[in-house]
Image (cartoon, grey):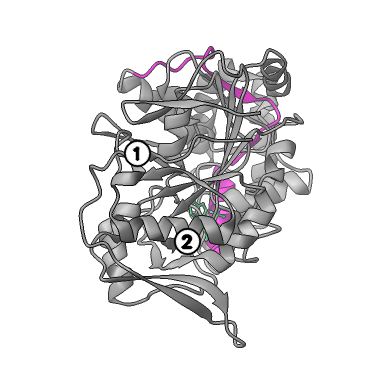
Amino acid sequence: MTYIFHQKDGILVQQTGINNMSNYIIIGAQWGDEGKGKISNLLSEDVDMVVRYQGGANAGHTIVTNGKKIVLHSIPSGILTNNCKNIIANGCVIEIESLAAEIENLKNERIDVSPENLIISNRTHIVTPFHKLLDKISGAKVGTTGKGIGPCYVDKIRRTGIRMESIADNSFEQKYLEQIEYYKNEIKEHFFKDFDIKGSIEKQKKAASILKPYINDTQNLIYNASQENKNILFEGAQGTFLDIDHGTYPFVTSSNTTIGGAFCGTGVFIEFHKRIGIMKAYTTRVGNGPFPTEQNNKIGEILRQKGGEYGATTGRPRRCGWLDLYQLKSSVIANGFNYFAITKLDCLDDFDLIYAGIDRDKDGNPVYKEFNGWKSDITNIKAFEELPLNCKKYIDFIETYLKVPAGIISVGQDKNQTIIKNKYKD
Ligand code: IMP
C-alpha cells in the first residue's frame, strides 16, 4: 500500500482520503536524546492518539514550538495538539509528584490537560521517593538519571510494586506505608535519617488526589481506537542501546526500549505501519558504558556546544562522538525500521571532515569512513535537493548502508526547520 504525504509549512501532513489508518512508532535508534520529542510532536499533528509505553521521568522530550521551549518528561507530546488523546500505558513507571507538577506547568502555559486528553493506565507502576533514594545508592555505577526507574522496575518484577489502581481504589496510602516499612530495613542509615516520612506521605497523597481522575483502563482505549481506524502514534523513550535486553548491559535502563516494549507496555497487538528510527547525525550518550565512536576531545566538545548536548532531565553534559552506522545496523534488526528521521544534521555544518563508523577492526575499534564537510549553514533549507552536495552524499551513504530511507531530516530545533525527503511506501 502506498501512503501519500504533502508538505504544509514544511511539515509532513498525510493526505486524507488516501488511506484511513496509519500507526506510527518512533524509537530512539541510538542511546536516547535523538530528538524524538520534535519528531513526535510533528507527527502528532496527524494522529488521534499518542501512547507512551515504557520508561518514566528519566525521559525528557524537549519540544520547541513557535520559539517556545517545552520539556515533557512523562506526558506524551500529543498534549500540545488539539483533539489528541494521550495515553500513559502500563509499561511506564510514574513519579506521581512530578507528573502532577508537569500537569500544573502545562496548565500554567495555557495548555489544555484533562482526563479527556490524558489517560493513565491503572496498571502503571508508581516510582516512590524510596525508589529514588535507592537509585542514589545503587545507580552510580551505571550513571542513572537518579529518577528511581531501576528500583521501581525491580519492585514490579519481584511483584511488590504499587500500581496506579491503588490510587483509584484508595489503597495507595496503606501500600505506601507498607513499602516504607519494608525499605526501612534495607536503606542505609545515613540516606534514610533525613527522610521526612510524614511529609512524604502528605505530598504523595496530594499528588495522588490530583492524578486520580486521570486513571483508567488504557488497554481497551488503545484497542478501541485501533478498531475504529484511528491514527495512533506510539512514542518510545530512551533509545535502542539502553534496552534492558538488547542494549549495552549493564549500562542500560530497566525497560525494553526496542519495539517489543510497545506490545507488553500497552497490552495491545497492533500493526505499526511506519516504524521510524530517530537518529542523530552523530552520536551521544549520557551515563557510563561503552561508546566506540566517542570523541573525548575537541571534536566532541564542538558537537556538545553546537548541539546543546546537556541532558533535558539531569542537565548532565552528554558524551559526544561520530555516527556509528555499524552499530545502527543492529538497531534496524531489533526494530524493523522502515524509515529514519535524521536529526541535528545542522550540527555538522562547520566540520571540514566528518566521519562515520562503518566496521570494527580485529580489536573491536571502529573503522571510519571519511566524508568531506559542507561548511555552510543548512538551518533554513526546506528541501532535500537544496542541501549542499556533500551533505546529500552523507545522507545517501547512510540510506544505502542501512538500507532504510531517510524520511525526515531535521536541520534545527524549530518545527519548521524540517525537510521531508521521501514519500513513504509500506
Ligand atoms: P535510568 O534509566 O535512570 O535507570 O538510567 C540508566 C541509563 O540510561 C543511564 O546511562 C542514563 O543516563 C540512561 N538514560 C535514561 N534515560 C535516558 C534518556 O531519556 N536519554 C538518554 N539516556 C537516558
Q: In the image, what residue occupies the spot 75% across and 29% down?
A: 268
Please check the rendered image and state whether residue 200 is part of the magenta-colored stretch, yes or no. Answer: no
The residue segment tinted magenta is 111-139
Q: Where residue 99 sits in the image (x, y, percent)?
A: 48, 32
Q: In the image, what residue occupies the spot 71% across and 31% down?
A: 271
Q: Which badge, 1 or 2, comes first in the chain's sequence?
A: 2
Bin the neighbour count of mark 1 within 10 Å (Cα to Cα): few under 14, some 14-19, many 20 and up. Answer: many
Residue 138 can be seen, yes or no: no
- Residue wearing tag 1: 418
Q: Is residue 201 above or below residue 334?
A: above
- Residue nearest the viewer, comparing 107 with 375: 375
- Residue nearest the viewer, comparing 321 with 419: 419
Quadrant of res 359: bottom right
Q: Which mark is residue 397?
A: 2
Element type at mark 1: strand
Q: Where residue 281 sits in the image (x, y, percent)?
A: 41, 57
Q: Where residue 258 sits in the image (x, y, percent)?
A: 65, 49
Q: Which mark is residue 324?
A: none
Q: Is residue 171 left or right of residue 43?
A: right
Q: Is residue 228 above or below residue 329?
A: above
